[in-house]
Amino acid sequence: MDRQTMDKSTVELLARRAGLDKALADHPEDVAAAAAQAAVARRIKAPADPRAEPWPPMRAGDGL
Amino acid sequence: MSDLHWMTAAAAARAIATRELSPVDLMSALLARIERLDPKLNAFIRLDGEAAMAAARTAEAEVAAGRLRGPLHGVPVGIKDIIDVAGLPTTCHSKILQDSLAASDAVCVAKLRGAGAIVLGKLSTHEFAIGGPSFDLPWPPARTPWNTDHHPGGSSSGSGSGVAAGLFPMALGSDTGGSVRNPASCCGIVGLKPTYGLVSRRGVFPLSFTLDHVGPMTRTVADNALMLEVIAGHDPGDPGSAATPRHRYAAGLDRDVRGLRVGFVQHFHQVDMPADPEVTAALEHVARTLQLEGAEIRDIHLPTLGEFAAVNRVILQSEAWAIHGPWLRERPGDYGQLARRRLMAGAFFSAGDFVQAQRRRLEMIAAVEEALRDVDVLLCASSMDPACRIDSPPDIERTYPRQARTPFNVTGHPALAMMAGVSAGGLPLAVQFVGRNFAEATLFQVARAWERAAGTDKKHPAIV
């Protein structure tokens, strides 16, 4: 999905799925502005190597 | 002694230890200055003056009895109000937490008190360290003492404003996308984001677990090194804490920089986000000065600022949404508009976006590590513009993202911002130095060489 052009109904659907019904009712312009920011994810280049791991890696350990 | 308010933490600690300066006299001078200036600066959310004065009297009695708690005995410190101080609210500058009382000190605060420092109070921040400067919160935003019509940077805005104005010699800030280094840049002081894991985050309200750092903010490089010595160290209660040996960060401060290799990341301010000409000139002046001092300057290339910023934002806003989701669902109206917009953004990223950002982050860490194999320190821009007016939302929105600080939250490398000069309009310009992981001592060495050559530690705002 191209989130740069996310339409109003998609924004509403995602916001309701996230439980933001109250924000949608009281601050609809802020919900729209928040959704527009998600387009930034498209600027991240996916690693060319499909085996590339995220950071931090999973580690076995004793925890705290 | 005159001008106690411009005394450095190190000088105050020395004078108190030798009984040339009474901690009560120092505290009285600073409280009087706060009373006079803070109504214009709004650095404080809560001044704890009576407790601070009582602690100063105790410190004086201890000195008289020959007992010094540590290297900061009797020195006042301000604490950003996302960091717990026992018995005081940690409001995060938000209506959401305005009555949230801290039961105990954050680890970094406990270490400062253990070293003898005296907590003056809690300092203004952007709401939850992300939403500001804002005028729709229970407290007003802080302002820069260089020109109170302009913003002091954020989110550790009260820390930057108060240190620069001589309200206190040192403060704690936090840095997730540049929030120690931005106010350091706007207010002409020294701000360090230490290596990820060097300073405990326990007792600090989180914004992003991956990117959060706690750091010292001071008027001089030596004070910054002294403060870091006190607050650094392993904390088994912080899952991100690193087990590292203790360092004497202040020990090599006066070594010269002959033979050091400095990598100048010019594409940040020349290509990725073309900087204000005064900023460009100041950065070139810093590079030339270090070269004259004997350092070797090399050109260095890293990934673009745009991509660093994208990785930072996806991780930051996804993790912040996980923290704030419950409040945003139930009490969205209790946030200011800026925080509400920025914190809700995380609801619109996918799990895949987050993992992709974390995968790209590993490549970015590798790129900076590779660069730091060929040089000892990186030199680059911090802010691309002097601070704009605080009452101009379009200018704030345009200039705030024009910065080169987020790369080093993404990679975790230590990064220090400090004054590079003063603009024609009378506002500070800044430079940033970046080091190898846990090599803060080298950062301080280079920063001190610049400070010594340029006299940046002697430049204060004209506010009286």
Image (cartoon, rainbow, N blue to C red):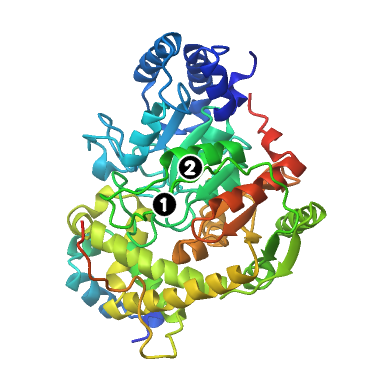
Q: Which residue is mark 2?
A: B228
* Picture coordinates of residue B164, whole percent (x, y): 58, 35
Secondary structure type for disc 2: helix
| As drawn, B189 above or below B208 | above
| As drawn, B53 above or below B183 | above
Chain assignment, label 2: B
Task: Give the residue at the far front of this rendering.
Answer: B245
* Picture coordinates of residue B177, whole percent (x, y): 46, 58
Residue B302's tag is none
For marks 2 and 1, give the CA distance: 9 Å
| As drawn, B116 above or below B60 | below
Res B222 → quadrant: top right
* Picture coordinates of residue B270, whole percent (x, y): 69, 69
Relative placement, left or right, of B329 versus B347 is left
Secondary structure type for disc 1: loop
Chain assignment, label 1: B
Q: Which residue is mark 1?
A: B198
Q: Amino acid at mark 2?
A: Leu
Res B124 → quadrant: top left
- The C terminus of chain B lies in which quarter of the figure? top right
